[in-house]
Image (tube, rainbow, N blue to C red):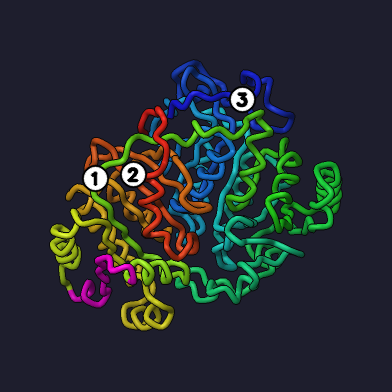
Amino acid sequence: MTAERRSGPPRNDSDAPKGFLRPADGPPGSPDSVGGAGGRGILLGCIADDFTGATDLANNLVRAGMRVVQTIGVPADPLSAEVDAVVVALKSRTIAVPEAVAQSLQALAWLRQQGAQQIYFKYCSTFDSTAEGNIGPVTEALMDAVGTDFTIATPAFPDNQRTVFKGYLFVGDVLLNESGMQNHPLTPMTDPNLVRLMQSQTRRPVGLLGHAVVARGEAVIRQRMGELKAQGVGIAVVDAVSNDDLMRLGPALKDMPLVTAGSGVAIGLPANFGILPSPAAAGLPEHAGFQAVVSGSCSLATNRQVQTFMAQGRPARAIDPLRIAAGVDVAAEVLAWAQPLLASGPLLVYSTDDSQGIQAVQGELGVEQAGTLVEQVLAAVALGLVRLGVGQLVVAGGETSGACVQALGIAQLQIGPQIDPGVPWCHARCGAAPAGLHLALKSGNFGTDDFFIKAFKALAQSTVANATPA
């Protein structure tokens, strides 16, 4: 990204507040040299446990004025773009704990080589995990690696109706375990008590930084964090019910080497580096090409979005996992159906289903096989659609987004304007779209009911800034 915008003083190592990570030492051009254009280190290095979560975080940072690049996996080479933050998108949310830890530590090592002054581990705003992990084990591994004995944890994202109060996670007006997330096929969320849930995943004692403290601002927050540390607490779940709470929390995290959170906390961090909101940070190249949606999420929100899209009379095609398992080339069928329809406007390919439908398929195929089969077909469909000329693609669902991005061979995303809270348009180049592809990766639970329709309108209406594509 080359959006020309700077706020705050020039940066160098001495500008880093006490307690921040220092760039790794090494001669220019060496693996241990500071990354970024001109050898200048990045300010914020972020590790996200899935691809839609990564764009969610990057979106909030861009809205707060940071120039952001999202990488798909851990890059093999040093960073070449001059940016303020890098979000490394992993697909580690539901894999085995040792592998999730290993990938996260690899991402940390790369970010530190690029000079990251602070590390941000990002997970879902519904805290998607189980008693085994992966949020707790990854958090502790990162704490050990950066050498800190204290951090915070909060998935609060009020813009998307995720709030934490007295340690309990709410989705809208209901507790997490009453929100539909209790039926998640991979990480059913049955306990809304984040202190209890985080404690089940960690060795370190987990405490609570309550709303009465957060509401009183930075000095009181810092005082309470000191008290919790003195009591031996290693991880503090933080209450937040509004963006004002997150903005009060931000300054108190200024000297914290590692922050763990959903994307909400990100709105209060850029100001710690002297950065102010700027529209230039969200500029993308001109859009072109056909429009399509690929949806693999089975969340309640995505189910409504699928129904709303079809109610508008737009063409839609469902994926049947049982036909895939029977050996039918479902991807080829879908692409043959789609090709003559693309010129007439956006179309939808989906495997989205309600909880009863999911359970029936999983009962016949098994949970893991059902998910893998559908992901593989949707990824093949996404690649095929782009080869047919789709230049504007919406993908719904974290696992689906990961599979599609990997199938397309995308290595890096430039983050653009927001469609809905947590979901921006992005731009990328790949072999299937050498001229560039506009891509929106939507977490299953995010977006209004008309998201699949308004996303393309939002891109058409967005102001195109002078920016170099990713």
Return the x and y of residue 298 as percentages of the image width and height. Answer: 41, 70
Q: What residue type is labelled 3?
A: Ser
Q: Magenta stretch? A: 311-326
Query: Which residue is found at the position 47% from the left and 61% from the top?
Result: 94
Residue drawn at x 55%, y 40% as measured from the top left = 63
State the separation of the CA atoms marked 1 and 3: 35 Å
Disc 1 + disc 3, Cβ < 8 Å: no
Q: Mark 3 points at which residue?
A: 7
Amino acid, disc 1: Gly
| The magenta stretch spans residue 317 | yes
Q: Name the residue under label 2.
A: 438
Residue type of the residue flagged with mark 2: His
- What residue would you read off at disc 1? 289
Quadrant of the rendered structure where residue 320 is? Answer: bottom left
Q: Do the residues labelled 1 and 2 touch (CB within 8 Å)?
A: yes
Secondary structure, mark 1, is loop
Residues at discs 3 and 2 in contact (Cβ within 8 Å): no
Mark number, residue 346:
none
Residue 42 sits above or below residue 159 on the image: above
Please, what secondary structure does the residue beneath circle 3 have?
Answer: loop
Q: Is residue 460 above or below residue 447?
A: above
